[in-house]
Amino acid sequence: MIELRDVYLNYGSREILKGVSLKVEDNCIKAILGPSGVGKSTIIKLMLGLIRPTHGEVFIDGIEISKMSEVDLFPIRQKMGIVFQGNALFDSMTISENLSFFLRENLKLSEPEIQQRIQDQIEFAGLEGYENALPENLSGGMKKRVAVGRALIFNPSMVLFDEPTAGLDPVSSKRILELITRLQRDNGLGAVIVTHIIDDVFAVANNVAVLYQGKIIFDDKPGNLQLSNHPFISSFMSSDEVEL
Ligand SMILES: Nc1ncnc2c1ncn2[C@@H]1O[C@H](COP(=O)(O)OP(=O)(O)OP(=O)(O)O)[C@@H](O)[C@H]1O
Ligand SMILES: [Mg+2]
């Protein structure tokens, strides 16, 4: 469903991605693992058409999006929910308002339909009783679950998670990873998870691409990471550190 084909991305004179090719199949959970600053969030932005490659192509469901106008991109973006690295919640809006804001802005649904979708996400994310709370009154894990609910409210077929567990305590991390697994198992959704935390990969991913110095140095099942003889992969597989 999502494919990057020989993508190069420069910010000014800095080359961030140097010929990245990867595929994310429908209903598959694909992790993109890499150290801080390697270009993981950049890959998510490319997949959404928020930035355009310096060279190369980005396909969503077989359609090349990198030269599309914003108007043409809109229906394509609707197929993909996004959970941003910092959640990007609106501080002055309640949880229900945060969940429904983009829905109200972009789709002409009746009020009962909107309320039903809000309720579905409140239940899915386990946020019952917090409908009228403000984000500042929620824990980090709960805020992340609101961000997940907001990504799901358009009924996407794929959800992109930028560092879904970064900064969360182990219990909250586990809960977010369980939500991601449930999305695939119960709702048949696919997901892209960019992360620098290898435990996330082993917990949920069917497939993992490792991004290092602008290139994909591994793209296979997580269980095969042990077999890689790339020095970067060997070094973090043999260390006790779980974060890159
Ligand atoms: N708009 C921009 N203009 C210039 N440089 C940028 C821009 N966005 C990101 N960068 C730089 O490009 C590199 C890759 O950024 P990116 O945010 O994709 O990395 P990342 O892997 O997501 O990092 P992190 O682990 O910190 O989230 C970083 O060095 C970053 O400072
Ligand atoms: Mg990032």
Image: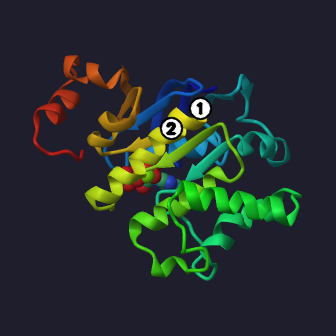
The percent position of residue 70, horizontal first and vertical second, equals 80, 48
Q: How busy is the neighbourhood of tag 1: few (under 14 within 10 Å), some, or many (20 plus)?
A: some
Q: Secondary structure at mark 1?
A: loop
Check the picture and name the quadrant holding the C terminus. top left
Q: Amino acid at mark 1?
A: Gly
Is 206 on the left-hand or right-hand side of 168?
A: right
Which label is found at residue 192?
2
Residue 49 vertical position relative to residue 212 in the rendered view, above or below: below
Quadrant of the drawing holding the N terminus: top right
Q: Nearer the viewer, mark 1 or mark 2?
A: 1
Cα distance in 3D space between marks 1 and 2 = 14 Å
Q: Position of residue 156 (x, y in %)?
A: 68, 42
Where 129 sits versus 20, above or below? Answer: below
Quarter location, residue 165:
bottom left
Displayed quadrant of residue 195: top left
State the image coordinates of residue 142 (x, y, percent, origin top left): 45, 66
The amino acid type, in three-letter code, at marker 2 is Val
Q: Is 197 or 11 nearer to us in this picture? A: 197
Apparent side of residue 225 relative to residue 164 in the rendered image (left or right): left
Residue 188: numbered disc: 1
Q: Is residue 10 visible?
A: no
Between 127 and 240, the one lying in front of the other is 127
Res. 138 visible in picture: yes
